Image (spheres, coloured by chain):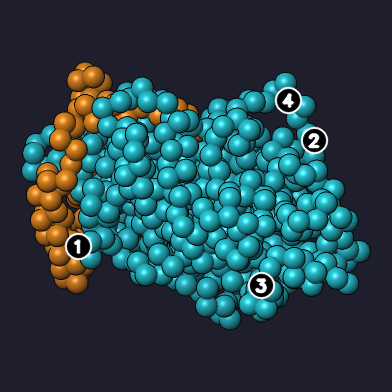
Chain colours: A cyan, B orange
Amino acid sequence: MKTQNLNGANLGGPEILTSTVGGSAAAPEGTRLESMTVRRIMGTEIEYGISVPGQPGANPMVTSSQIVNAYAARPELSKGGRARWDYEEETPLRDARGFTYTGALYDPAENLADEDSGLANVILTNGARLYVDHAHPEYSTPEVTNPREIVLFDKAGEMTMAEAALRAAHTPGIGPINLYKNNTDNKGASYGAHENYLMSRQTPFADIVAHFTPFLVTRQIFCGAGRIGIGQDASEHRFQISQRADFFEVEVGLETTLKRPIINTRDEPHADAERYRRLHVIIGDANLAEYATFLKVGTASIVLSMIESGVFDGTLGIAEPVAELRAVSHDPSLKHKIELRNGKRVTAIELQQSILEQAEAYCGADADPDTREVLDQWAYVLDALARDPMELADMLDWPAKLSLLDRYRERENLGWGAAKLQAIDLQYHDVRPEKGLYHRLVARGKMKRLLTDTEIINAMTEPPSDTRAFFRGRCLARYPSEVVAASWDSVIFDVGADSLVRVPMMEPEKGTKAHVGELFERCEAAKDLLDIITAD
Amino acid sequence: MAAKDSGGQSQSQRSRQEADADTTEAAVDPEIAERHEAITEEVDDLLDEIDEVLETNSEEFVRSFVQKGGQ
């Protein structure tokens, strides 16, 4: 392996991929982060449940690696040798409140996602990352700029997992492995569906804690995935709205695997840290329903924009956020009254309606189409939830699942503890089109959709056009032999010189199709590309 | 398991009954009622399919789904 003498390319970097050094950090040139819009750099990362039929003791590190490696055998990923993950800029121990953990308080398992520990990792030509994290296969979407594209790449991840399992099943020596896009085994374990939002560094973290928390506690009424079982081990058998609610124990913190916080403080921007923070949201459920994902990230992005602009006055502060998170989840009738710090009591619907009203006033009548669509759908689901949540059985996960369970329960006269109902709960999340109950609903045309299967299949290999994921994905597709490593903010090439060339991409909105698309058509070899982008 | 089940059940039934009562009141709008009925019919039809695709031994299937914790 050549040493990473980086030829100086990492210091300033080509202008089409990084911000101009010396640009004013106080006044970001991109207005996107500061304007009244849902658009911002965002992404999701989903850990999938993994199981070998009849072998509950199968080693999940091994089976997860088998899944990732099976997908890596796809022709476009296997022709040039696999690119490694570049960890140079990773700082998962950094805390948004301004200090860095030295390790004593930190779970070392956090850093396990490393090829050196034998766990598989593959960077896809759409700019996504498929790898093994915490004994689960995980799919991180490429960076995108709007909620519709989150849905697109989140669903592409789901299809990637389905194909990976199919490929694994056809690999000699590997038995069938089933994957579930859910968040708990109902026996005490939970695994994450995280969202990431790039924000202005200028926004005080305390504002995020104060104003994002009431939103996060109540948004589950439209983006919960539904679950039979109360408590981390599901010891009480009844239906609740969220998969994750019972696994959150504190209001703010750095942990992600134990004592999970409603607001996670990880401060790892994968971008220019002077200008940006990446808010790491760990409290969501993994969604199958396209509108649930769309609303989950769309509303969150609008609310963050309002926080950046200082819209909220703090009157929605919740007295006991952790307890209310559970209380809201445990009441599918949506009648529960949340106690606010000011002593008022409101339902989750009312609290969301109050945020929506402020969002409407904030975004105004001239909101761009992406923002308008989120606002309209947000209003639609809140109105429908207030009438009857079952009206949304064709649009959102928890009403869809509860509707199935209620009908089945009535027909078979079953109590909530029945194994059949728990099997339905679990199998709703099966990624296989022929077995997953969500997918069976879709096949019958019974779920409203934002996307076509053709669009999703295309997104499994094609990167988004308007972020640096375009550059990453195209480099991997075009120069598979020369790209030896990559990460969110770098691509490292071996073009036969004495040292490797590391191209940093600290600006997520550069390296787009508009910036570099033509170069990939023009440059036959990676060396030609590097000659152009590293020349001043 | 059965004892815990009944404990959770009564509370759940209470909240479902409340929701059902509200549904009856809200269902005066014929358009909503029609849509609701259409959804219900489809779901009923789906139940037979669920029986076909559901993993054969539900109890064993649910029990053997054991995960290591993640993030």
Query: Do the residues at discs 2 and 4 belong to one chain?
Result: yes
Q: Position of residue A41 (x, y in %)?
A: 63, 62
Mark 1 to mark 3 CA distance (whole Å): 46 Å
Q: Position of residue A308 (x, y in %)?
A: 70, 59
Q: Which residue is mark 4?
A: A103
Could you tell me if the residues under marks 2 and 1 are in contact, i.e. CB atoms within 8 Å? no
* Chain where mark 2 sits: A
* Chain where mark 1 sits: A
Amino acid residing under circle 4? Gly
Does A192 sit left or right of A199 as displayed? left
Amino acid residing under circle 1? Arg
Q: Residue at x 36, y 57 (%)?
A: A289
Foreground: disc 2 or disc 4: 4
Q: Nearer the viewer, residue A152 or A469?
A: A469
Q: Position of residue A148 (x, y in %)?
A: 48, 67
Could you tell me if the residues under marks 3 and 4 are in contact, i.e. CB atoms within 8 Å? no
Q: Which residue is mark 2?
A: A99
Which structural element holds mark 3? loop
Mark 2 to mark 4 CA distance (whole Å): 12 Å
- Image quadrant holding the N terminus of chain A, namely top right
Q: Which residue is mark 3?
A: A524
Mark 3 to mark 4 CA distance (whole Å): 46 Å
* Chain where mark 4 sits: A
